[in-house]
Image: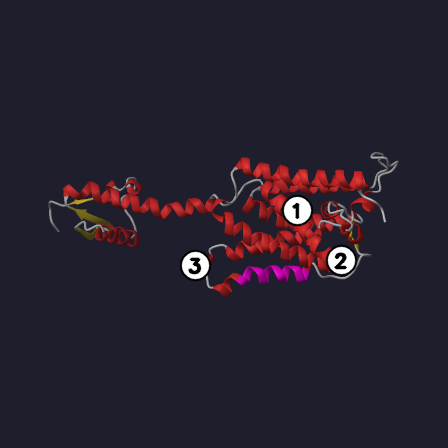
């Protein structure tokens, strides 16, 4: 070994405290120097690896290795910022709102010209009334439930998927896109059901959330995956739909299927258009959340003011 050369490993920023590094790391650094045309020698002395270069090129070698380390770390930082915080808290408030509203619908409340507001009659997804132009029922129907069991089943299932989705999209964006998925699912369902069909419940949005997650996962990292691999998340979502959304009783299977389908399309669009910027900045996410709340409040105002009861 040339006695005039110096070991640069102790001078590398990430290794100053402990100059001992692994063989794999030394080989990576050696390749970096080789690519930059910097002459060097690799050796090991007393179980400690050394990379020796000429003194006049030591600073350049250290800078190249540090730049390589920074580039390798940047993708990890970006991936970690994809997860938004507050999923449990935000989900709690949404589901608490659903439960409080259910309680209100069971009370004799006067207003809007009614001695006792007939919430279900005014806000349910009545296919005939939707075809007559009462589009707001597509939204208001999501907030209504037939009984406590119906409510709690939707709260339990919805909480799981909404927590996950909030970590992907942020609380405001997740809430609004789930609402839109449920609204679109109800809309498509109204196109295929007969005029006498009436539905209510948040479950269309619950399966919309499943679809959104499937759509995001299907497109996520698509440049590194085979086309058929992208269908795996959608298949998993369909499996959940089959297990949770096609049982007996008064379950509206079609609305679950259409909610899932609309959610999947929305997830693909979100990931394709804004995947690199998700979750959005706090201000954008807050605006999305307010928009979702305004959609619900506006729809109920229209329902209470202009809906007719068949």
Estimate how packed mark 3 is, as few (under 14), some (14 to 19) or many (20 or more) residues with alpha carbons within 10 Å.
few
- Disc 1 or 2, which lies upstream in sequence? 1
- The one nearer the camera, 271 or 153, is 271
Report the Cα–Cα distance between label 1 and label 2.
19 Å
According to the image, label 1 marks what residue?
Answer: 179
The colour scheme applied to this rendered structure is secondary structure
Q: Which residue is mark 3?
A: 224
**Looking at the image, do the residues carrying marks 3 and 2 touch, with CB atoms under 8 Å apart?**
no
Horizontally, residue 19 falls left or right of residue 286, namely left
The outermost residue toward the left is 3
Query: Could you tell me residue 239's position as x and y percent?
Result: 63, 62
Residue 7, horizontal then vertical, whole percent: 19, 45
Q: Which residue is mark 2?
A: 251
Magenta segment boundaries in residue numbering: 231-243
Q: Earlier in the sequence, mark 3 or mark 2?
A: 3
Seen from the viewer's position, the closer of residues 193 and 162 is 193
User: Could you say which is closer to the camera, residue 281 or residue 114?
Assistant: 114
Residue situated furthest front in the rendering:
132
Marks 3 and 1, the one that precedes in the sequence: 1
């Amino acid at each position: 070994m040339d006695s005039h050369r110096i070991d640069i490993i102790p001078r590398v920023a990430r290794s100053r405290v402990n100059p001992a590094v692994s063989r794999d790391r030394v080989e990576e650094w050696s390749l970096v120097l080789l690519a930059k045309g910097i002459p060097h020698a690799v050796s090991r002395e007393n179980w400690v690896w050394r990379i020796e270069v000429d003194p006049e090129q030591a600073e350049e070698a250290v800078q190249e290795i540090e730049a390589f380390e920074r580039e390798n770390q940047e993708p990890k930082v970006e991936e970690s910022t994809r997860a938004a915080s507050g999923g449990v808290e935000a989900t709690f408030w949404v589901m608490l709102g659903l439960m409080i509203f259910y309680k209100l619908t069971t009370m004799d409340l006067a207003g809007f010209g009614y001695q006792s507001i007939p919430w279900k009659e005014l806000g349910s997804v009545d296919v005939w009334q939707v075809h007559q132009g009462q589009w707001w029922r597509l939204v208001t129907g999501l907030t209504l439930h037939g009984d406590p069991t119906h409510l709690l089943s939707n709260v339990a299932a919805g909480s799981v998927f909404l927590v996950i989705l909030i970590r992907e999209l942020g609380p405001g964006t997740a809430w609004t896109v789930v609402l839109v998925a449920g609204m679109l699912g109800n809309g498509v369902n109204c196109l295929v059901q007969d005029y006498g069909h009436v539905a209510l419940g948040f479950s269309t949005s619950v399966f919309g959330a499943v679809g959104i997650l499937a759509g995001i996962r299907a497109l996520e990292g698509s440049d590194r995956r085979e086309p058929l691999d992208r269908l795996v998340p959608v298949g998993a979502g369909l499996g959940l739909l089959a297990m949770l959304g096609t049982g007996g009783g008064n379950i509206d299977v079609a609305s679950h299927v259409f909610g899932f389908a609309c959610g999947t399309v929305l997830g693909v669009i979100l990931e394709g258009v804004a995947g690199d910027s998700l979750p959005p900045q706090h201000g954008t996410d807050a605006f999305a959340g307010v928009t979702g709340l305004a959609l619900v409040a506006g729809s109920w105002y229209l329902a209470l003011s202009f809906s007719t009861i068949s």
